[in-house]
Image (cartoon, grey):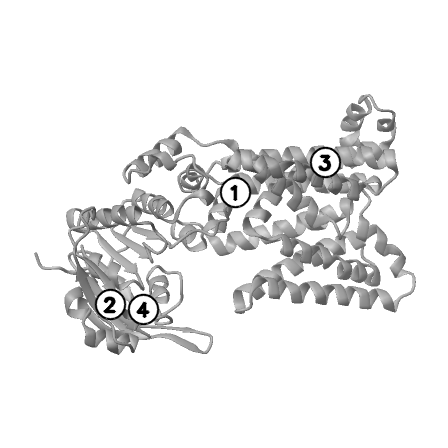
Amino acid sequence: MKSTPAIRLTDVSVTIGQSVILEKVDAQIMRGHITALIGPNGAGKTTLLQAILGLRAYSGRIDFVDSSGTVHKPRIGYVPQSLAIDRQAAVTVLEFFAFEFQRRPVWLGITGKSRENAAMALERLEAGHLLNRPLGKLSGGEMQRVLLALALHRDPEILFLDEPVSGVDIAGGHLFCDVLESLSTRQNRTIVMVSHDLSVVSQHASHVLCLNRTVACQGETPEVLTSENLLQIYGLHSGLYEHTPDPHQHCDHHHAHDEAAHG
Amino acid sequence: MVETLLEPVYQLLAHLPFDAMQARFMQRAVLEIALLAPLCAFCGSLVVQFRMAFFSDSIAHSAFTGVALGLLLGIDPWIAVIIFGLGTGMLAVQLRRRSEMAMDTTLGVLFSSTVALGLAIISTKKGLAKTLPGFLYGDILSISDRDIFLTTLLLIGTLIFLLRFYNQLVYTSLHEHLAHISGVRTSWLETAFAALLALVVAFSIRAVGILLVTALLVIPAAAARNFAGNLRHQVWFAVFIAIVSGLAGLASSLAWDTATGAAMILWATFFFLLSLPARSLTQG
C-alpha cells in the first residue's frame, strides 16, 4: 500500500529573539511509519517537535492531513523525555493519571473511574504494578512506560516521542521497542521521535529527517543513514555497524551502534 | 456589620476552657490562624511542587515598598502591600515569559530592587521607620475583624479555585508541555496561581511578618511531604501541621512572651525535624 503523508511541513521557520533556530523546513512525515528527527546538538530537533505540537510560534505551514489528503486535527499523544519531579515528591503514578482523567482535586480522592482507566492503561504496557508507586522513585524505563501508557490512553493517531530511550534500562528499551513497532506496523499509527541516538534510530525508525537548522536530508532510514550523509551532518567520520543479535532482543532488527559520538 | 457576623464564632471560641480565650484579641487570633493555616497549607503544597519559595519571598519583601508607598500616599499600608505584592507577582511572571533570564535571576533583581526602593522611600521621612517592625515580624494579636473577614473571603476564593484547578496546576508543574497538549491553559493558570499566591503572601504578612511568611507556606508542606506516601495525604498533613503549629505557636508565645509569628514557625520547624526520619519509612 502506498504511504501517504500524515504531516506536511512547508517553509517552516522558527526565530527566537535574534537567533534563527529553523529555516525553511520542507518535509513530510509519512503515515503509519516511525520517523526519527535527528541532527547534531542545536540542530533544531526539539524546536521542530514543539512547533509541530503547537507549543512554539513559527512561520510557514504545518498541516496534519488524513489519508484522503484533507487537512484535519488528529488525536495526538506526546511522550516527553522525563518529568520535572524530584525523588522526594509524593505524587503517585495513579495521581498523575488522575490529573488527566478527573476534575475533582486529588486531595479529595481518586474516582473509581480514574483508578480503573489508569490500571487499564498501565496493564497494556505490563506496568500495572507501578500504579501506586511515587513518580519520583521510578527508574528511567518505568517512567517512559508510564508516560507512554498515558499517551496511548488517548488512542492517538500520531505519537510524538522526545528522546524515548534516553536513560532507559535495556529491558525497558526492549519493551518500548516492541510497543512502538506494534503501534506503527499493526495499528498503522504515525510515530515521530526525536533522537540523538543513531543506534535507536537505525533499529526502530523506518524514515529519517535529518536537521541542521534546515532539512539536511530525508527519506527511508537505510538510504539516509549513510556515511556520507552522517559526515555532512555531524562533521565527523560517522557510521553504523551491526553485530551479532542479542538472543534476548525482542525486536526483529539487528543491533546497531553509532560511532558518531566517538568520531 | 463584620463584627456582628463574627460574633457567634467569638462566642463559641469563648467556651474553650482557657482563660485567655475570654479576650477578644485572642479569639480573633485563633480564628485568623484557623483560616490562614489551611490557606497557606494548600498553597504551600503547590509552592513546594512548583519550587516557588523564592517567588513568595520576593513578594513578601516587596511589602517594604508597599508599606512605604502606602504611608507616603496616605493609603492604608496593608492595602498598599496587597496591591504592590500583586503587581510584583504579575511583573515577575511577565518578565520570566518575555526574557530568557532564569526565574531566580529575575526574582533576585525584583527582590533587591523593591526592598531598596522601599527603604529609600522610608529613609526620606523620619518617623516612617517606626512602622516597619510591625511588618517585619507581624502581629497576629492585633488582627481586626475586617482582616478576618478578608481572610475568609480569600480562603473561600482559594478553595473554589483549587477545587477546579488543583490537578491542572500540579500537572503543569510536572510538565508544562504535556499539560498544555492535554488541554490545560498553562500560561493562564500559572499567572492565576502567581496572583493568588501574591495575595496569600500579602495577607499572611499580617500574621508572621515579611521575614517569615515564606516559612509559613513552605515548612508545613515540606514536613507533610516527608510524612506522606501520596499527594492527597501530603495536602491534608500540611493542613494539620499548619493549624497545630499556628495554635501551639500562639499558646507558647503567650506562655513565654515571644513573638507569635516566630513561635508558629518554630513549631512548624519542629514538625519538619520530626518528619525527617519518617521520610525513610514512608518513601523507602
Residue B57's spot in the image, x, y percent?
Answer: 68, 55
Q: Residue furthest front?
A: A244
Label 2 element class? strand
Residue B200's spot in the image, x, y percent?
Answer: 67, 47
Please give the name of the residue rendered at 83% of the width and 33% of the height, measured from the top-left corner.
Answer: B26
Tell me the mark number nearer the camera, choosing from 3 and 1.
Answer: 3
Which residue is disc 4 drawn over? A261
Q: Amino acid at mark 4?
A: Ala
**Where is residue B87, by image quadrant?**
bottom right
Q: Which mark is residue B166?
A: 1
Q: CA distance from mark 3 to mark 1?
A: 24 Å
- Chain letter for mark 4: A
Which residue is disc 3 drawn over? B245
Q: Which mark is residue A244?
A: none
Which residue is disc 2 drawn over? A209
- Chain letter for mark 3: B
